[in-house]
Amino acid sequence: MKLRIKGTAIRLRRDRKGLDELVTTDQTQEALRLGPGRSVAFSCSVEIGNAHRGQPRANYGSGRLVLFIDGSDAREWRGSDRVGFDHEQVAENAMMRIILERDFACFDRPSGDESDDAYAFQNPSDAC
């Protein structure tokens, strides 16, 4: 899982393994321990849940960022060439852009980091 936060946008990328996990278990998650104990952590997950078709939504609380996606969207996403979703969520007079997309293999990955692309989708610019 790759997470980027820039301004009012959250971009999250999932590889094939993460997308398969989402569809088969209804969630895919990663956590970063920031200190001793489970309570000192940041976690990020994508879950099948309360979201309208084509409109993933985000929620945050207690160190946990959750992006919800409609179940039909998740299944269709896995079985198609769709790159992802881009939706603007408005709550309490604030707008947040949510971008949920496939993680493609990098062209210029440094030597020794090839395992980062083990489950990445083939980059469309690298079509043979």
Image (cartoon, helix red, strand yellow):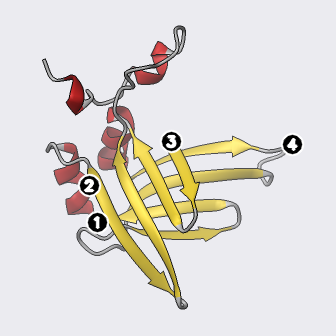
Task: Give the SS element for disc 4.
Answer: loop
Image location of residue 68, percent across then percent down: 41, 65
Mark-to-mark CA distance, 2 and 4: 35 Å
Image x and y of residue 43, in percent: 62, 52
The answer to whether residue 26 is seen in the rendering is no
Q: Are marks 3 and 2 in contact (CB under 8 Å)?
A: no
The type of residue carrying mark 4 is Pro
Tell me if mark 2 has few (under 14), some (14-19) or many (20+) residues whose alpha carbon lies within 10 angstroms of its own: many
Question: Residue at the location (20% across, 61% down)?
Answer: 72
- Who is closer to the viewer here, 86 or 32? 86
- Circle 3: residue type: Lys
Which numbered circle lies on residue 70?
Answer: 1
The residue wearing badge 4 is 36
Residue ID for mark 3: 2
Q: Is residue 54 above or below residue 35?
A: below
Which residue is rendered at x = 37% and y = 21% of the image? Answer: 107
* Residue 74 numbered tag: 2
Q: How far apart are marks 1 and 2 (CA)?
A: 6 Å
Alpha carbons under labels 3 and 2: distance apart: 18 Å
Q: Give the mark, 3 or 4, whose residue is nearer the N terminus.
A: 3
Q: Is mark 2 on a helix, strand or loop?
A: helix
Q: Do the residues labelled 1 and 4 touch (CB within 8 Å)?
A: no
> Measured along the vertical axis of the image, is residue 2 above or below residue 124?
below
Camera-side residue: 102 or 25? 102
In the rendered structure, which amino acid carries the disc numbered 2?
Ala
Between 25 and 30, the residue placed more toward the observer is 30
